[in-house]
């Protein structure tokens, strides 16, 4: 079934406001997605290292994620715009993604079990690919679901609640491995190469993932086609093409605001990719002072647990800071809010270079938390007001290009840079990531945001009335 797009001359009805509870249940599945995502971000590098990957090889294995996202998210967005069945429009996709993601979370830490047939490293990398594909299938429709259901005035609130739930899930996923290690689960690499605390954390993550998605499936609603048409307009078929051709057409005609946000996203996600890939080894070598073949040592697992917990700090900060974003944006504007948050993240990452006590790592993550909350919310708030109705799914998917491209660039060249330019010292990749967040903060100030202009005019009107 074709989902409608507004055409000229139509009078659209404003969407009704949703209660906070309705917005909460609609976004609750993101808690599960981010719980699994945090486990992946905090532990994949050390799992692959335990399977035999060198530190400068890690970006190449992490490259799978953005490559898969670049392909999957626009396709999922395109087809979810055109789907309606008994489950709804977006729900069939994120339910399927949740099931596949949960299975991948269970299998990844057990990849070493088949090492006698296929090298564990390649099985692990394959599971990362499956996991990322599944995460992308589950994640993209959630962004579109929020934009589908919320009126413009509630979108900042909607994305902020979504970011709060993302932070809540990420805190749980980030702290879980260290908590398991402190409560009787071994830090020693088992016979499959992965410590017991990591394996059981992934099992719990798979359970949380599927339960959280089911809450959204059962307790949230989507507008039926007739209601969707009333709020968004009838389909514009003047440029209707099949599958990939229509995606290409929409890509060529993306809104001006999306193009400008692309540069902001490039700097932001290049930095995030470096942080996720290199922080564990940066802390192990620069803070703990490990050298040589340390990847299977207890000390390396301790460093990894400390990093995972530190990631929990930035996600915890993001969880609460997300709730403040609407008020801050109303006062200083959405672009200034995002710029300030990105600057804080840059300071946080660069400060890791000066740390000698691993306990201090959590303080560096405070700034990263401000940036993370804003990265997950503000670009989408700025973007959503510029997307033609009926194209929310596809353009949210296309917007993912600006997330995946910088990660692909980093994946292709980041390891080479660490090995040849940084002398095998990953701490300098973290410092560069901090400077890239500064670049993102400057870039966002040049983005055209119709919402900021509208808010500014309204303030001027009220001040002069």
Image: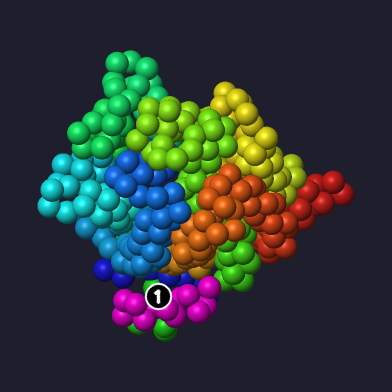
Q: Residue furthest right?
A: 464
Image-based side of 219 in relation to 192, left or right: right
Q: Residue at x 20, y 43 (%)?
A: 112
Q: Quadrant of residue 380?
A: bottom right
The answer to if 124 sits in the magenta stretch is no
Query: In this rendering, is residue 216 above or below 309?
Result: below
Residue 92 in percent (x, y) is at 25, 53
Query: In this rendering, is residue 389 above or below 115?
Result: below
Q: Residue at x 29, y 22 (%)?
A: 186
Secondary structure character of the magenta stretch overall: helix
Q: Quadrant of the N terminus?
A: bottom left
Residue 304 in percent (x, y) is at 43, 33
Q: Residue at x 32, y 41 (%)?
A: 50
Q: Which residue is mark 1?
A: 247
* Local SS, label 1: helix
Residue extent of the magenta highlight: 242-254
Q: Residue furthest left?
A: 117
Residue 158 in percent (x, y) is at 50, 43
Colour scheme in use: rainbow
Image-based side of 108 in relation to 380, left or right: left
Residue 442 in percent (x, y) is at 73, 56
Q: Residue furthest front?
A: 292
Q: Residues within 10 Å of mark 1 (few under 14, many from 20)?
A: many
Q: Residue at x 69, y 60 (%)?
A: 443
Taking depth in this image into account, of 459 and 336 the one nearest to the observer is 336
Image-based side of 159 in relation to 47, left or right: right
């Amino acid at each position: 079934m074709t989902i409608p797009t507004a055409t000229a001359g139509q009078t659209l009805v404003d969407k009704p406001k949703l209660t906070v509870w309705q917005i909460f249940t609609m976004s609750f599945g993101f808690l599960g997605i981010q719980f699994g995502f945090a486990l992946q971000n905090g532990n994949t590098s050390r799992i692959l290292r335990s399977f035999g990957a060198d530190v400068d090889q890690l970006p190449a294995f992490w490259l799978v994620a953005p490559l898969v996202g670049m392909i999957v998210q626009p396709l999922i967005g395109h087809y979810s715009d055109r789907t309606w069945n008994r489950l709804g429009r977006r729900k069939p996709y994120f339910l399927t993604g949740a099931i596949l993601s949960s299975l991948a979370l269970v299998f990844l830490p057990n990849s070493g079990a088949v090492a006698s047939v296929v090298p564990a490293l390649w099985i692990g990398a394959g599971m990362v690919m499956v996991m990322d594909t599944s995460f992308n299938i589950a994640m993209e429709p959630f962004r579109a679901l929020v934009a589908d259901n919320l009126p413009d005035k509630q979108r900042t609130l909607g994305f902020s609640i979504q970011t709060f739930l993302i932070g809540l899930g990420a805190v749980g996923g980030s702290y879980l491995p260290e908590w398991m290690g402190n409560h009787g689960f071994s830090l020693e690499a088992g016979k499959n190469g992965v410590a017991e605390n990591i394996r059981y954390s992934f099992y719990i993550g798979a359970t949380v993932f599927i339960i959280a998605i089911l809450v959204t499936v059962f307790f949230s609603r989507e507008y039926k086609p007739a209601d969707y048409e009333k709020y968004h307009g009838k389909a514009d078929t003047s440029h209707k093409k099949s599958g990939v051709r229509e995606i290409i057409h929409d890509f060529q005609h993306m809104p001006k605001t999306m193009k400008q946000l692309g540069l902001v996203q490039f700097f932001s996600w290049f930095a995030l990719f470096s942080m996720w890939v290199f922080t564990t080894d940066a802390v192990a070598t620069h803070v703990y002072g490990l050298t040589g073949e340390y990847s299977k040592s207890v000390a390396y697992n301790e460093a990894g647990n400390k990093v995972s917990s530190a990631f929990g700090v930035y996600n915890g900060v993001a969880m609460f800071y997300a709730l403040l974003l609407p008020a801050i944006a109303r006062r200083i504007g959405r672009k200034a809010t995002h710029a300030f948050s990105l600057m804080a993240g840059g300071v946080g990452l660069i400060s890791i270079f000066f740390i000698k006590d691993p306990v201090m790592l959590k303080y560096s993550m405070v700034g990263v938390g401000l940036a993370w909350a804003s990265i997950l919310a503000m670009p989408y708030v700025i973007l959503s007001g510029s997307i033609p109705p009926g194209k929310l799914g596809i353009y949210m998917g296309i917007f993912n290009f600006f997330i995946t491209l910088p990660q692909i660039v980093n994946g292709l060249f980041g390891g080479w840079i660490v090995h040849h330019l940084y002398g095998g010292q990953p701490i300098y990749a973290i410092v560069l990531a901090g400077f890239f967040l500064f670049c993102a903060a400057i870039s966002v100030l040049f983005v055209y945001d119709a919402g900021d202009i509208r808010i500014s005019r309204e303030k001027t009107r009220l001040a002069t009335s």
